[in-house]
Image: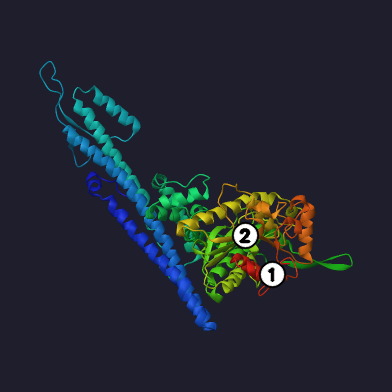
Amino acid sequence: MTPAMDLPTLKALKPAEYSEAADGYRTTAKMASAAKDDIEHRITVAMRTHLKGKAAEEAVGQVALVGQNFHYIQTQCGLIGTALEAFSYELEAAKRKLDTALAHARTAGLTVNPDGSVTYPAGGEKSEDGKTPPGGTVNGLTDGTASAVGRQAANFDPNPKHRLAQDCADLIASALKDATEADEKWAPKLRALKADDDLTVSAEDWADTSSDTKGVSTAGGEYLNSLPQPPQDGSPGDNAQWWKSLSPEEQAAWTAVDPKTVGGLNGLPAAVRDEANRIVFNETRARLELELNAMPKPPANEWTWITAGPYPSKVHTDEWMDWHREHGDRYTELNQTLSGMEYIQNRFDRTGTGDLPEAYLLGFDANGLGDGKIILANGNPDEADHVAVYVPGTYSGLEEIGEGEDHGDLGRAERLWDESHKLMPTSAVSTITWLDYNAPDSIIPQATDGKYAAEGGPRLYDFLQGNREAQLSASDSTAHTTVIGHSYGSTVVGVSAQSGSWRDPAVANDYIFAGSPGVQADHAADLGAGADHVWAMGGPWDDQVVRQGGRLMGLGDSLTIPTDERFGGNVMRSDTDGHGGFWDENSTSLRNQAAVLTGNYQWVERE
């Protein structure tokens, strides 16, 4: 156990030195972050571009592991810096308390002894026998009851110096107690903030980081509560203003100990949200991997044959059924979630392939809203000239966000970026996959119900407002923004477009609806961007079923859907052969979207 802090030690302590040490760790964290970004955005990109073959792929993988090491260093140094800052804060409070006691003692002519006791001289009115009340020495008391008794005794003493001495001694004792408790609390926390002495950042390491984060957050509550707090249910503008009001040290503290909050606040810079969400991503993946590895695996003898009547039947074994009843649901859930996270990691790893820009994880929650929350950008939207936000539809979720050779919904946003980049190679483009609503999990009854859009639309509007705030913070201007809704996602976009008021600045310049079953509006002009900036396209077969089914189920007001002439928008030509082909490579459908996204309306082929 750490020895109790004594008076000479506390007097000699300089809490600012711990704050200066925290600066050093924050500087190291910045250096590690820069090295990580250099590896991910420059070195591995160049290697993928110029080197081919299995040896090159292996080399890229090894270099990427070094990048993960730097990310781990960045995260750990951020925690250490915050821990030291919190320790310094608590020591500084104890030191101020001590300095106050010493100053009062000097003013009152008292003597503070090395053990913290206080000696007071004779003083007060002389008694009848002509004697001055004698002096004495008192020890400080920190127990509430004992301290009250001591003060009462001092009050009965005719020597007024006695009460002054007792007050000073109690304040000194309280300062020493506070300093000792801070030392005892933070010493093991700081000792725990160290990694294994190897070059592999394992799931255990990230899980340990998650535990460290909770420990620092809990122990540093006093310091963290002293910082400006995030707005409660604040607007994106409120969030942006709060973040800008923080010092670099305060920003680093919030990112280190509460990355989930920082990563989820609309209005904050994309780079800040990405850094915070990648911490959440790595810690979540590590926790889930460890849970899965610790779980009993399904028995190898899953099936057996039984004879029931004239024909044999294949059935699950009793052993497998026992396992499934106890572990099956969670085992499946863990595998699906980790599979979805692997798709996201795969996108990170493909940066630079085919000129694909760096990815920004603007939102992540493995269990958010039931299906998982994923907001991922290709390119930095804060610095882009053109931004597209793609909202997927029914069945969308983390477990299949990047599924298949076309990389699922993430791949659609990638191909949209690539096509837009080809059209406008000198312009900065960012395309975002936005899945921050509870997408329907069935055609009937869920996808025929407007409640999912009613919940998701305002969330999308809030995100778009946040993008606008972040862009204004970065460059005092806003990007040309296009919002694209596919299938039920278009219903979400339609509700979002009607979520603001006429007083609000525009959050989108164009809307595109692909395979839309309805957008909860009668006319394109109801969406706020102007009918000339509302675009729709449809396809045959199952796309017709979706669109006409939505019309009949009332997802479009007055049985109107965006591809209807009476809706009043622009109907674009589409060459898709069904509901999911609007983003097929080299398709007219994809080129038309890219033309709208980049503001080249003259290149759009219309019906």
Residue 456 seen in render? no
Q: Nearer the viewer, residue 124 or 442?
A: 442
Mark 1, Cα crowd under 10 Å, few <14 / some 14-19 / many 20+, is: some
Helix, strand or loop at mark 2: strand
- Tell me the amino acid under the disc marked 1: Glu
Earlier-in-chain disc, 2 versus 1: 2
Q: Which residue has dot 2 on it?
A: 510
Marks 2/1: CA–CA distance: 16 Å
* Foreground residue among 193 and 230: 230
Disc 2 packing (10 Å; few <14; some 14–19; many ≥20):
many
SS class, disc 1:
loop
Name, please, the residue furthest toward the right.
310
At 89% from the left and 67% from the top, the residue drawn is: 310
Q: Position of residue 360 (x, y in %)?
A: 52, 63
To which quarter of the image does residue 194 belong? Answer: bottom left
User: Which three-letter amino acid code belongs to the residue tagged 2?
Assistant: Asp
Q: Quadrant of residue 489?
A: bottom right
Q: Residue at x 18, y 34 (%)?
A: 107
Mark identifier at residue 605: 1
User: Compared with residue 589, is residue 454 higher up or lower down, i.e. above or below?
Assistant: above
Q: Is residue 352 left or right of residue 225?
A: right
Q: What residue is rendered at 34% in x and 30% in y? A: 145
Q: Is residue 308 visible?
A: yes
Say whether residue 429 is left or right of residue 130: right
- Residue at (44% x, 68% y) in the render: 36
List x then y, in percent, for residue 540: 78, 67
Relative depth, front residue between 167 and 412:
412
Residue 471 image offset from top left, x and y in percent: 49, 58
Picture disc at residue 430: none
Q: In this orientation, which residue lies closer to the viewer: 513 or 166? A: 513
Answer with left or right where residue 516 lies relative to residue 460.
right
